Amino acid sequence: HAGTAKPQPPPAQPAAAAEYVGSETCAACHTDVSDHLAQTPHGKGAFAKLSSQGCETCHGPGGAHAENPDDPALRPRIDRMSPRQQSETCQKCHDGHKQFFWKGSVHDRRGLSCMSCHSVHNFKSHEGQLKAATETEACLSCHKNVRTDLWKSSHHPIREGKMSCSDCHNPHGTQTAKMITANSVNDQCYTCHAEKRGPFLWEHAPVRESCLNCHSPHGSNHQKLQKTSVPYICQQCHSNTRHPGTLYDGTTLADQARASNRIFNRACVDCHAAIHGSNHPSSPYLGY
Amino acid sequence: QEQGQEDQTTTQEEQTSTDTRKEFTFRVDPVVLGIWEADVDTDSAKWEEYRDVSSGFVPFLNIEGEAGDRFMNFRGEHIRRDDARYNFSYGILDRYSIVVDYNKIPHRFGNNGHMLWTRTGPGRLEITDPIQAANQTTLVNQFAVNPSAINFTFLNNLLRPYLATAQEIDLGLIRDRTLARVDLGSMAGFAWGLEYTHENRKGDRAYGGSFGFNNVTEVPEPIDYDTTGAQIAGEWNTQRGGLRLGYRYSEFENNISTLMWDNPFRVTNSTDASAYQAPGSASVNGSVIGVADLAASNEASLLFFDGRTRLGGWNLSGNLGYQIMTQDDPLLAYTPNTAIQGIGFDHQRFNASDPATLPVRSADREVQTLSLNAQAGTRFGERWDLTFRYRFYDYDDQSDRIEFPGYARYQAVWEEIPRITVPYAWTRQNASAELGFEITNATRLGFAYILESWDREFREIESSDEDILRLTFDTQPSNWFSLRASYEYGDRSIGDYHTDAQEFSFVEPEGINNLPGLRKYDEAARTSDTFNVLAQLFPTEAWSFSLGATGRDEEYDESEFGLVSDDTITYNAELSYTPGENLTFFLFGQRQDRESFQRNRQSGGTLSTNPLDDWQVLLDETTDLWGLGMTSRFNESWSAELEGRWSKSDGFADFFSPPGGTPNVAVDFDNYEDIELLSLLGRLDYKITRNARAGLFYRWEDYTIDSFIFQGLQNYLPGALLLNPNFQDYTGSILGFELSLSVD
C-alpha cells in the first residue's frame, strides 16, 4: 500500500556472468508462478514501477540460471540466502512504518527473516501474505504455549477472529519489551480499556504499574483473565486484620454451611467493585 | 546518469497520469451466501460470547477493484450480524491510501439474570416504594422483637416472593469500532499518516453494588462508552536512517457516569454505628439508595518521536514519548443517605449528602509519563554481534493530594477517619547488553545481562533491582531441523519493606497494617527461572514434527506471607503429515501445569501473632489442549475438512491450617476451576464450476464448567442478592450451507 515501498535504483551490477534477463524470460518457464504472481501485489503495475528488474529485483540476476536451467547451483533461490540477507532483500522496499525497528529486533537477532512468516508466491492469508491462513496461526507456529492460553475459557476474542496478535504486538520490532506497540503494558491495555485509564481520586497502586500484575492477557481459567482466581489473588497481597486475612475454603462456598460473599460470585469484587480506581469521595477502599 | 533518472521519473509520472485515467475493473471474489441453522440446549451466554451464531443468513462479500495503480476494495464479513466487519480501502499504490474499517465485537457475559430493580432512566434502578416499605416494616418490627432472628432464612423468606417474579436481564455489550486511516506516501521525503478511531460500547455488565457486609446487591452496570482517538504522524526515511514523529489524542467519555440503585430493605434513610452490617441482628438501618461513580471520563495526549540511523558500523534506534493523562469528573457527594451527618476537620457536623461540603468539587487528576528507549547494535569480527539497550518509563501522578475528613462507609454510616489521596508514582529502568556469537552460519549463541530497576513513591518498597542473565541458542543447520532455546535466570533484590505503606492514605496514623512478614508479590524479592525450547523437524516433504516446552518458576523465598511460589510449565507436541498435495493430517497436544502457593494468617480485630492461625493454599491447575484434523481434496470437485479440539482445565485448591488456632481446619475443593470445551467441525465443499462452489459444514460444541466460585449460586445467598446470569454449560451445533460465487 501507499507509503510502504519506495522506488529502488537497479541493484549494483554483480559479476559479469550475472546478467539480468528480464521477467519475460523467467515467465517463459515459470508460467504458473508468474500467473499466480500477477494476481498479487508483487505482480501489479506499481511493483513494476518500484522495481527496476522485475523478478530479479528480489531474486538477483538470472542470466546464469537461464543459460543452464538444469544446474541447481545456479538457481537464484532466495531461501539459500541467510535470514539477514533475505530480510535485507525485502527491506529494500519494505522499510519504515511497521518495519521501522526491524533491525536489531528480537526476531532479527534470533535468526528470523521476513520469509519465516511471509511468502511472496505461496501465501495463505487474506492480509499480509502470510504462510499461515491467519496471523494468529502464524504467530502460534513458534509461540505454541500461547495456544493453550487462547483456548482457555476466559480469553480475548482472538480465536473468534475479532482480534489478532498484532493488535498488541508488532512482530517486526518495537522499542518496548515483548514487542508491544505502546510504551508500556498499561498504555497498551488502555487503547481498548480506556475506562481504566483514570487517573482516579483513589488509586490501586499495582493497577497503575502493570495490568499484568493481576491479569493474563492471553487467556486464563479464571474469569476476567485473572492470573489467579479471586479471592486468592487479592489475598496474595492483602492479609491484614479482619476479612482480608480470613480463610475462605471449601466450607465457605455458596452452598456450604459457612457460605461467604467473599468467595462466591465475584468474591472481593462483590464489594470492592471499583478495583481499578474510584472517583467516589467515600471510596478509599475502592467500593464504588 | 542524472539525466537518465530524470527521464525515468518523467516516464513514471506520465505512467501514473495514464493509470489514474483507467476505468476500474472489479472482481467479486467471492460473494458467499450462507444459511446457518443453530441449535443450543441452554441459554448460556458462553455459546455466543464473542460471536453471533444465530440461525439465519450469513453473507460474505469481497470485491477487489483495480484501475492501473488505483485500487478499491471492499470486504464484508458476517454482514448485518452482531459480529459483522466491513473494510473499505481506496488509493493509488505508493501515493496514498484510505482505509475505513468497521468492526462489531459482541461480548456477552450472562443471560437471564434476575433482578428486583426496574430501569427507570439511564443509570437509575428502582424498586417500587411499597416493596421497600413492606420489607423495612417487617425488618423494623422483627428487630424490635427479636433481632437475632434476622438471619439468612428470614431475609430469604422476605425476598423470595419478589424474586419469583423478578425480571430477567441479559448482560453483555457490543463494541462498535470504526477506524479511518489515510496514508500519504512520499511527499518531500515524508510519509504522513492520519488516523481516526471511534468506539461505542453499549450494554450492561454485572456490578458489585453493596450496602454493607450483609447486603451485597449485584446490579447491572449500564455501559455507554465513547472512545475517540486521532493520530497524525510523519515519517521520513533515507538510506542513512529514518525519523518519525507524531501526536496521538484519546478521549474516553462515559455517557452514564453515575449508577443509582434502590436498597431492597429500606424506604427511608437512616444510620447508626452498625448500619453497614444491616440487615442483620446488629442493625436494620441504612441508605435508601446506593450510588456508584462509574468509570470517569478522561483524556490522554501523547507526543512521540522515533528515530534510527547507522553510524560507524552501529545501528542506532530509539524513541521518546511524552504523555499527559487527565481526568476532571465532578465528584459525587459522600453519600446519598440524607440521614448521615459528616464530621469535618473542625469537628463540626455537615450534610454529607451535599456535594458542596466536599473539599473539592471535581477530581482534577493529572499524570505525566515519559518514556525513552534506545538501542545500539553492531556486528564485529566475522561472527559476533553486540547490542546495548536502555528503556526508561516514568509514571508521575502530579495531582494534588486531597484530604477528606472522613467517609461514608457503605452509604450507611460516617467514619470519622480522615483520608488523603495518594498520587502513586514510579520509574522503571531497564538496561541490557547482549553478546551474540554465530557458531556457524545457521547457529547463534546469545548471552545477555539485564538490569531492571524500579523506584516507587508511596509504596512498600522504594527501590528494587533485578539482575537477569539470559542465554539463547538458535540453530537451523539444515532445512529439516531447527532448534530454538532460551534460559533466563532472574534475581530481584529489594530495599526496606514498609509494611505500613497503607498509612500514606491516612491523614493521621491509623495503625492498620498487613502482616509484617507479608510481601506483595509485584514488589517482593524473588528469583525466577524461565526457559523455552522448541525443536522442529521436517524429515521428509510429507512429515513435520515439533516438540517444545516452556516454563517459568518464581520463588519468593523472603516472603513469609503472600505469594510464596508460582511455577508454570507447558509442554507441546505437533505432528503433521502431508502424503500428497491433496491430503493433510495434523495432530497437536499441549499440557500446562501450574502450581502457585501462598501463605496467610487469619486475624480478628487485631493482628494475630499466633502461627496456629496460619493457613496456606496450593492452587494447582492442569490445562490440556488437544487437536486433530485433516483436509482432503478428493478430486477436482470435492474437498473435505475435519477438525476436533478439546481443551480442559482441572484445578485443585489444597488447603492446610494447623490445628489449634483459628482457623482450626481447612477444607480443600477440587473445582478450582474445571472447564471443558469439545469442538468438532466437519466441512464438505463441492466445486460446481470454476467460479462457483457449494459448501456444507457442521460445527458441534460442548462446554461445561464446574467452578468453586459459582458452585451453588442462587439469586439470594447469605449477604448477597445476585443477578446470577447463565454463562455456564451448553451443547450447541451449527449446520451451515454456503453458496460461493466469484465474478470477474
Image: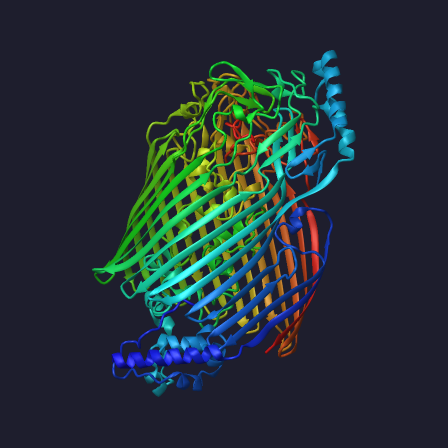
Q: Is residue A239 above or below residue A79?
A: above
Q: Quadrant of the C terminus of chain A?
A: top right
Comparing A127 with A19, the one in front is: A127
Comparing A19 with B273, the one in front is: B273
Judged left or right of residue B166, residue B294 is left
Residue A162, image x, y percentages: 56, 55
Residue A108, image x, y percentages: 35, 59
Comparing B166 with B254, the one in front is: B254
Residue at left 54%, top 34%?
A274
Q: Is residue B331 above or below residue A223?
A: above
Q: Quadrant of the N terminus of chain A?
A: bottom left
Can the viewer see residue B190 in this picture? yes
Residue at left 58%, top 41%?
A223
Q: How many marks?
A: 0
Q: Hey, which quadrant is residue A97 in on the image? A: bottom left
Q: Is residue A131 above or below residue A18?
A: above
Q: Hey, which quadrant is residue A6 in on the image? A: bottom left
Comparing B469 with B137, the one in front is: B137
Can the viewer see residue B108 in this picture? no
Residue B566, image x, y percentages: 46, 38
Q: Is residue A131 above or below residue B269?
A: below
